[in-house]
């Protein structure tokens, strides 16, 4: 449900969230086909693909909440940002060899960390509005 008392986010924020949602679909399909079934533990591919599917859902839900100006925007953006930080962390620490580590660090710097910062921006900006709204609604009269 849209909360019309909150100002809309800039269109570019919604566009970025929607674009990432769409771009993660072919990336996840690529991972499904190319990840080995065993890296150090069995089902390594299932773990990463499953996480990316959840990340797609988080981006989609955050984009939906941004478009609708729904109260769920703050917690969804917080969850998505947290998942991005986890993704960056596990990509780096589970990488093997200098090439994989370098690629994981580059992906973190170019993709995951800036997107996590965007989610933090949403949380901080929208959080101010939600706190103000809650104070106004608690006042008598």
Image: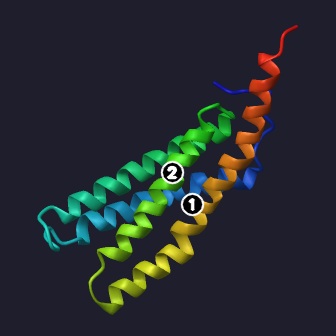
Query: Mark 1, residues whose alpha carbon is within 10 Å: few (<14), some, or many (≥20)?
Result: many
Q: Is residue 4 visible?
A: no
Residue at the disc numbered 2: 80
Please say if 50 is above or below 133: below
Q: Is residue 122 visible?
A: yes
Q: What's the residue at 72%, 27% (across, down)? A: 3
Q: Position of residue 32 (x, y in %)?
A: 26, 63
Residue at the disc numbered 1: 116
Question: Dot 2 lies on which element?
Answer: helix
Location of the C terminus (image quadrant): top right
Please say if 110 is above or below 140: below
Q: What's the residue at 20%, 65% (across, down)? A: 44
- In the visual, does 127 lie left or right of 140? left
Question: Dot 1 lies on which element?
Answer: helix
Please say if 61 is above or below 32: above
Q: Position of residue 132 (x, y in %)?
A: 80, 32
Asked whether 32 or 83 is in front, the reply is 83
Say which label, 1 or 2, has the lower sequence index.
2
- The colour mode here is rainbow
- In the visual, does 29 lie left or right of 103? left
Q: What's the residue at 81%, 37% (across, down)? A: 7
């Amino acid at each position: 449900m849209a909360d019309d008392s909150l100002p809309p986010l800039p269109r570019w924020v919604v566009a970025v969230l929607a674009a990432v949602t769409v771009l993660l679909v072919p990336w996840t399909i690529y991972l499904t086909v190319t990840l080995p079934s065993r890296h150090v533990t069995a089902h390594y591919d299932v773990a990463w693909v499953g996480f990316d599917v959840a990340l797609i859902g988080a981006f989609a839900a955050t984009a939906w909440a941004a478009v609708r100006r729904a109260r769920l925007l703050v917690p969804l953006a917080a969850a998505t940002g947290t998942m991005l930080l986890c993704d960056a962390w596990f990509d780096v620490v589970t990488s093997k060899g200098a090439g994989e580590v370098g690629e994981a660090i580059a992906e973190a710097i170019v993709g995951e960390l800036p997107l996590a910062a965007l989610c933090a921006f949403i949380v901080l900006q929208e959080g101010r509005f939600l706190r103000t709204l809650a104070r106004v609604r608690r006042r008598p009269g």
